Image (tube, rainbow, N blue to C red):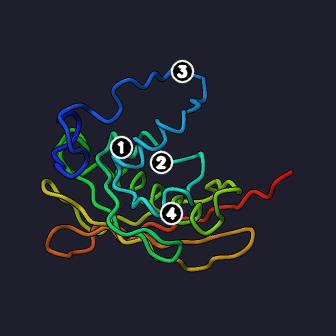
C-alpha cells in the first residue's frame, strides 16, 4: 500500500488516487464516481457522503492516510498514520497536525452547512504539546460554535496512549449562494 501504513485506508492493493490526474494551477473537477472513491477511501460513512455534496473529500486527506471513524457536524473522529507524515528528524510533521485538523474542521463545517452550501477556512492555529515518532494518531473534532455564517471547531490530536499531541482551532465561513 502506497503512502500509508494504515491498512484501513483502502481495501485493495491499488492506491485510492490511482487514475486521478492533477495539474499545477488547475482546480480538479471530480466525477461523482471519483468523489465516491475518495470518500470510501477516507472511511466516510455512506450515510454522510451526501452531506458533503459534490465537494467530497480532499485527495490530500487520502494521501496522508486520514480515515474517518465518526462523522457529524458536532463531532468527528479520525485517525492518521505517523509513517509517511514525518519531518526529516522522524517526528510527526507539525504541518500534518494542521492538515488533519483542517480536514476534520472543514468536513464538520460542510456537514453542518449541508450539500448545497460551500465552506472555506478563514482561520487555523495550533499549539503542539508533545511529539510522536510512530504509530497512529487520533483526532477528535468538537464544535465550539455552529452558526449560519461561521463555524468554529477544536481538534485535539492524541497518540495511541491518549496523550494530547496538539490542539488545533479552526474557523470556517459558510458561503451563501449568489
Disc count in the image? 4
Residue that mark 1 sits on: 62
Q: Determine the residue positioned at 74% across, 72% down.
A: 148
Q: Along the polypeptide, which appears first: circle 4 or circle 1?
A: 1
**Circle 2 — which element?**
loop
- Measured in 3D between alpha carbons, the distance from the residue under mark 3 to the one under mark 1, in whole angstroms, is 19 Å
Above or below — where is 145 with respect to 84? Answer: below
Q: Along the polypeptide, which appears first: circle 2 or circle 4?
A: 2
Residue in front for this viewpoint, 67 or 45: 45
Residue in front for this viewpoint, 83 or 7: 7
**As drawn, which residue projects farthest toward the bottom?**
144
Looking at the rendered structure, which numbered label has been put on residue 11?
none
Residue in front for this viewpoint, 55 or 82: 55
Q: Position of residue 147 (x, y in %)?
A: 70, 76
- Measured in 3D between alpha carbons, the distance from the residue under mark 3 to the one under mark 2, in whole angstroms, is 19 Å
Residue that mark 4 sits on: 105
- Measured in 3D between alpha carbons, the distance from the residue under mark 1 to the one under mark 2, in whole angstroms, is 8 Å
Specify few, some or many for label 1: CA neighbours under 10 Å numbering under 14, 14-19, or 20 or more. Answer: many
Q: Position of residue 95 (x, y in %)?
A: 38, 49
Above or below — where is 164 with respect to 49? Answer: below
Residues under numbered marks 4 and 3 in contact, where contact means CB atoms less than 8 Å apart:
no
Residue that mark 3 sits on: 24
**Circle 1 — which element?**
helix
Looking at the rendered structure, which numbered label has been put on residue 57?
2
- Measured in 3D between alpha carbons, the distance from the residue under mark 4 to the one under mark 1, in whole angstroms, is 16 Å
**Circle 3 — which element?**
loop
Amino acid at each position: 500500500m502506497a503512502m500509508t501504513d494504515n491498512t484501513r485506508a483502502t481495501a485493495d492493493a491499488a492506491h485510492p488516487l490511482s487514475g486521478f490526474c492533477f495539474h499545477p494551477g488547475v482546480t480538479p473537477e471530480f466525477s461523482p464516481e471519483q468523489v465516491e472513491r475518495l470518500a470510501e477511501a477516507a472511511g466516510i460513512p455512506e450515510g454522510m457522503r451526501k452531506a458533503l455534496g459534490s465537494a467530497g473529500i480532499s485527495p490530500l486527506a487520502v494521501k496522508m492516510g486520514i480515515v474517518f471513524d465518526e462523522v457529524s457536524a458536532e463531532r468527528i473522529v479520525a485517525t492518521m498514520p505517523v509513517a509517511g507524515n514525518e519531518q526529516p528528524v522522524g517526528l510527526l510533521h507539525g504541518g500534518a497536525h494542521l492538515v488533519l485538523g483542517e480536514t476534520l474542521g472543514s468536513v464538520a463545517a460542510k456537514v453542518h452547512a449541508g450539500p448545497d452550501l460551500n465552506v472555506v477556512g478563514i482561520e487555523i492555529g495550533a499549539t503542539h504539546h508533545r511529539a510522536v515518532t510512530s504509530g497512529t494518531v487520533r483526532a477528535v473534532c468538537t464544535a465550539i460554535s455552529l452558526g449560519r455564517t461561521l463555524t468554529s471547531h477544536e481538534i485535539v490530536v492524541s497518540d495511541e496512549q491518549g496523550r494530547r499531541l496538539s490542539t488545533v482551532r479552526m474557523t470556517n465561513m459558510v458561503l451563501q449562494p449568489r
